[in-house]
């Protein structure tokens, strides 16, 4: 087995202190070391990575679902995919300095596997799985959110910026809640025309203040239009 190491600084970085230190050690033990030493393959961090993969995905899903109440499943799925991809999780692992704590085989260490994005992604997910086993769901999800908070906010800022696909209701929600939760509502002002060509007129409110008005041939279209006008007034939506 590798020499016992001092994990105080790492635990400070991740904001969690383990009750069972062996779980933390296991989360950082790469398959190359296990294979080199002839240990049982279950001693590597791959089982914890398997568990942590689910912990990370659910934590991110829960966070963006709560932050974007008006986003549809397509927007949420695209955002989650950007956040839990290999490059995204590897970047977070680097920020935490997980590479320096990994236990690698000699060949893998010489091959600079500490910098390998897939190895770092696995280590982050294994760490999330270890925290889940040691401290439960709340501790694990808090760890994941704190580690990914900047990435989540940056990704939210970039949602649907391509013309024609921008979800303006989601963009408005993001813009208005930068400093904390706010109450946004869409209220139907009136509808006009025959049933087959009905036009809807909607106002968007921040609490009781009208931020913008819009219209469309469905309530959803009118709400998007109202959100777009609100963004224009906030100087967020700019035409090229």
Image: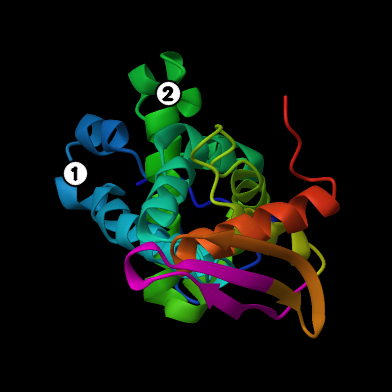
Circle 1 — which element?
A: loop
Q: Earlier in the sequence, mark 2 or mark 1?
A: 1
Quadrant location of the C terminus?
top right
Image location (x, y in percent) of residue 153? 66, 52
From the viewer's perspective, tell me whether residue 170 is left or right of residue 182: left
Which mark's residue is nearer the viewer, 2 or 1?
Answer: 2
For residue 120, the mark is: none
Give coordinates of residue 20: x percent, y percent: 45, 73
Q: Name the residue: 26% across, 48% down.
A: 46
Q: Residue furthest top?
A: 111
The correct choice, above or below, for 176 with respect to 87 in the image is below
Tell me if residue 86 can be seen: yes
> Residue 113: which disc?
2
Q: Nearer the viewer, residue 156 or 211?
A: 211
Element type at mark 2: helix
User: Quick one: label 2, few (<14), some, or many (20+) residues within 10 Å?
Assistant: some
Q: Position of residue 184 (x, y in %)?
A: 68, 76
Closer to the camera, 239 or 69? 239
Residue range in magenta is 180-203
For residue 95, which quarter of the picture? Answer: top right
Magenta span contains residue 237: no
Q: Nearer the viewer, residue 150 or 53?
A: 150
Gap between marks 2 and 1 measured at Cα = 20 Å
Asked whether the residues under the numbered discs 2 and 1 touch, taking CB atoms below 8 Å apart as contact, a structural biologist would say: no
Q: Which residue is mark 1?
A: 39
Q: Is residue 196 magenta?
A: yes
Residue 217 point in image, percent of width and height = 45, 60
Residue farthest bottom in this picture: 208
């Amino acid at each position: 087995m590798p020499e016992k190491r001092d994990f105080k600084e790492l635990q400070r970085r991740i904001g969690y202190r383990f009750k069972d230190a062996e779980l933390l050690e296991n989360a950082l033990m790469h398959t190359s070391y296990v294979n080199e030493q002839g240990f049982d393959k279950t001693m590597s961090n791959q089982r914890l990575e398997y568990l942590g993969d689910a912990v990370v995905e659910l934590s991110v899903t829960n966070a963006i679902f709560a932050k974007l109440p008006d986003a549809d499943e397509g927007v949420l799925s695209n955002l989650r995919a950007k956040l839990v991809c290999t490059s995204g999780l590897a970047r977070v692992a680097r920020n935490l300095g997980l590479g320096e704590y990994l236990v690698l085989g000699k060949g893998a260490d010489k091959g600079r596997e500490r910098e390998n994005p897939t190895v770092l992604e696995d280590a982050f997910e294994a760490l999330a799985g270890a925290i889940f086993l040691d401290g439960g769901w709340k501790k694990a999800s808090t760890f994941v959110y704190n580690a990914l908070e900047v990435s989540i906010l940056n990704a939210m800022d970039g949602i649907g910026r391509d013309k024609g696909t921008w979800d303006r209701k989601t963009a408005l929600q993001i813009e208005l809640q930068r400093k904390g939760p706010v109450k946004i509502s869409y209220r139907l002002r009136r509808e006009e025309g025959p049933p087959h060509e009905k036009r809807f007129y909607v106002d968007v409110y921040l609490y009781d203040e009208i931020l913008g008005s819009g219209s469309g041939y469905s309530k959803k279209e009118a709400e998007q239009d109202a959100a777009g006008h609100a963004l224009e007034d906030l100087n967020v939506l700019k035409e090229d």
